[in-house]
Amino acid sequence: MTENVVGDRVLVAVQAINISRLSTHPVPTVPGTLIVVAGAGPKDSNGAGKSSFIAAITALLGDEQWRFASGAKAVSELLFNAELAAQGDQQWASADHGYIIGVFDVPSAGLPITVWVRVNQEAPHLEVRWTDGVCLARAASEADRVSRADELWAELPKSAGRRDVVARDLTRVLYGDRVRCVSFLSTSVRSKVATNLLSQPLNEISPERIFEAIAALTGLDAELDQEREARRDEHAKRVRAAQAEERLREFESDSAALLTTFDRRDQARDRLAEALRFWRGRLARRLVDAADRDADLATELAAHQDTADTTADAIAAVRTEISGLKDDSLDRALASARRELASTQVRANKLETERAVIQNTADELRAQIPALEDLQRQADGLDVPTANAELADARRVLNEALKAQGVADREAQTAETALQEAESGPASAQLNALAAAGLPAAGLLDALDVAEHAHDTLATPGGWPHDLAVIVDSGDMRAAAHALADLPGSVLVSSAGVTVVGAFEEAVTGRDARIKAAEQRLVRARDTQERALRTVRQAEDGVAAAERRVEGADAAVRLAEIHQRLTNQRDQLTILQTTITELTPALDTAEQEVSALDFRARTRNMEVERLDGRRQRLESERDQARTRAAQVTAERQALDLPALASEWSAHWPPMSPNRLGNPPAPKAAATSANPVGSHTPASHVPVSLTPETHALEAHALEKARAWLADADHLTADEWWRAAERHLDAALRATFSETDETPEELDFLIKERRSGRSAQELATFPALCASLASYLRSQEEFERHQRHQIESQVTSRRRDLSAATKGAEEAAQSTAVHRAALTEAIKARLTRVAEEFGKLDTGYGGYGATLDFPVPAAPADPEQRWSWRVIPKWRRGEAQTYVPYNRRANTALMDEKAVKLVCAAAIASSGGTHLTLVLDELGRNLGKEHRREAVSLFRRIGETHGITVIGALQDDMEPYAIDACGQYIKLRRSSDATPYNDPPIIIAHDRHPERVHTLAPWITRPTPDQAAGNPA
């Protein structure tokens, strides 16, 4: 399988399909800088999908916190969830699959590759495919892009031959052994959320949590899990060794009791052999009594069997006929006809539904016509252009009237001001008039320093009041008199004398004249203002009338459109009605065919039922013959001839005391039978054997007579009593008082001890057979057990030795693994400490390091090996390192946290490109330090080739937008839409060819372009 497909390429664009509520628009990314992701939801930044967007990027880049080796099921939680998206009456379907698409490119090389990661709700949860070039889902709408994504996925070649690469192989196939992404995510879909060093003040985070965060960033989590697994294995092997030792002790103790029991049962076997020898004498007396009766019963049995065979043949013929009728061709034809009928009915229902929809649409259009006709009457016969022209003229007249009203308002205000000045101001009107004429002047009272009590007596020559007197230059007297011509009673004082303008007999007469003139001017101005107001109102009425005519003309246009749409709806209804009419004969034909086939099927079923009745009658006759045959067989069995022959054969030849096995089958020979209880020698009693008599039975009869000839002349009862005594002794030797008797033996023993002789005789063979069987089974078992005890002792001792050795080797292996892991952790933390120091000294600090003492391994195998990392830094030149938990200002703490995160990211990158993803970027930073912290992220990222992607809250956005290298804003204007709005992206890429490559895919396509897929 191919490895490291992406190689040195970096992520330059990402597209999410059916991922949360993210828009399906492609989002370009600028590598090697700070990319901030802001949001604008319906209320605030929450709900815009920032966390889902950066989580999708971490899954695409193979962040190991998703647990790819276990199938990465948590990634499927990123899919669009209709239950979470539902708002009010809005309903959408949940996505069962989606896509995270990434475009990777090498700067200035122009060799892009597109990676498609399909996210499934069901296993496998991740599938990966890729192709050369840029291949994104491109269409004019969100829904079209979702459909286009499925089409493109089907066209992509499978990445692993006949199958796709799944989650467990994603990082190896795409990125080889490189770490391409580390993250701090607070999203709830992550199976494990690492401690975020930027989520709270650094001095509030414990050293253990700081180590966990660095371990997540540098990939030490997997190695720590391996160390814990090694401790689990060591513990399990130690437990197995202790269990093996305990089992050996218990087994040796139990074996001694078993051997004693085995010796006692050997004695029971000898007594049982004697009991069987005495039982053999009784069996010989009873073996052949029913031979003649057995021959008669055999003849009758043959007759019944012939009857059963004949009826069986007839039953077979009937069943063959039934099988022919039950051929499924008719059922298949009926099922096919029903499917055709259902298909035709579905089509007819669909046409009826379409007709109803079109009819409803036509009804809705007709409902709009009365309102539009009422509006059309307001047009007074004008068309839209004429009505718009009339409205423009009315608005022009209104504007002119408004201008005239403004002029009249200003004239009225000016006249009112002049009246106020004439009524109240001492020479103010005169000074204003002279100033307007450009003549310098001053009030007489302003020029003279007169005592306040002399003001009332002071008068100008000629008796004019002093308050209307103004002082001018002697050369301006004529011009000043002309300027004050409209102010009768004004007094001009200069070095050439005193001039009174429009002199009257009394000074007060001039004031009244001025007031009267100002009042007349105000009246004229107000009359003009009233006429202008009436003109404005008339113009406004004209505009309103023109607007109503425009609205009526627009309604006429809309009414024409509705009539046209109604015509189209009627045409569609006609077409649908024609189609429905044409479909009706086909529907009738299908119904008739189903009815005919159904009738044939019912007729067939009736014939099958008739034949089945005949079959049942034949079976009844056959069963009766078989029942009688069974009765004859039972009667033959009741003669006990086979049983007695079998019992005798089971006890022949005579057994040795230690052998209870069955004797070999004897040769057949003709002999005579001896009646039960008879003492006549067997050789003197003739017997007739039928051909059905088994050769084994004949041989058993011959051997029984021969045995009795050599045995003691005892009665059957005497043989029986002796056998009973030996059986009791065998039972006592077989079972002790504490032994559990087998259920069958226990039942037979209780039946035998019921006190009736017939019961004892009936149970004796079964009891002996059961006891012999038990002893035989126990004999093999005991022999096997003796061997097994010896083998088990040897094996358990060997197992104990192996378990002890395995526990020792596991302990050594765990110690070696822990030592190697300790060195690896120390090396990795040393690397982080070095980068921490470089970043601190390179960006305004005095040096920093990490203190990480090696902890002892925990005794609990389930407990994680917890380390402690204590950041330290200098607060001045040549000063000692100070631990991070000492009191310090907030800015310093935030700066060191940012540097520590970047140092861990640099240490994990191994010199290759790395993406650092942070959720809630700068959430804990103070307002005065946020811009500096974000700027530091950007500078460190650009210096070390790290792409830093951070999600922002609302209060962080103003500080980050000016300091970042790329700005992405995800927008969702309303909960009523399933997808976000198109995102806002502001960025600059120093590699313009990369932008040119992505431009055709990112810009919104025209409808013609969206119809196809660019090469």
Image (cartoon, rainbow, N blue to C red):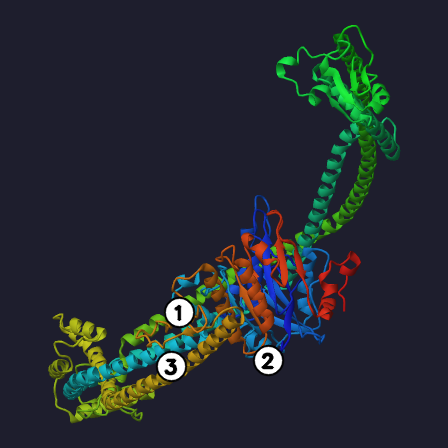
Q: Does residue 791 appear anywhere in the picture?
A: yes
Residue type at mark 3?
Arg
225 and 770: which one is in front?
225
750 horizontally vs 175: left or right: left
954 and 403: which one is in front?
403
Q: Are marks 2 and 3 in contact (CB under 8 Å)?
A: no
Element type at marker 2?
loop
In which quadrant of the rendered image does the N terminus lie?
bottom right
Element type at marker 3?
helix
Q: How many marks?
A: 3
Residue 821: percent from the left, percent from the top?
41, 80
Residue type at mark 2?
Glu
The residue carrying mark 1 is: 882
Give the spatial CA distance, label 2 vs label 3.
Answer: 30 Å
Q: Residues within 10 Å of mark 2 (few under 14, many from 20)?
A: some
Which label is found at residue 818?
Answer: 3
135 and 534: which one is in front?
534
Q: Give the mark toward the camera: 2 or 3.
A: 3
The disc, 1 or 2, on the residue closer to the chain's N-terminal end is 2
Residue type at mark 1?
Val
Which label is found at residue 3?
Answer: 2
Residue 874: percent from the left, percent from the top?
44, 70
Q: Give the mark toward the camera: 1 or 3.
A: 1
- The correct choice, above or below, for 691 with respect to 605 in the image is below
The disc, 1 or 3, on the residue closer to the chain's N-terminal end is 3
Residue 782: percent from the left, percent from the top?
22, 87
Residue 753: percent from the left, percent from the top?
13, 72
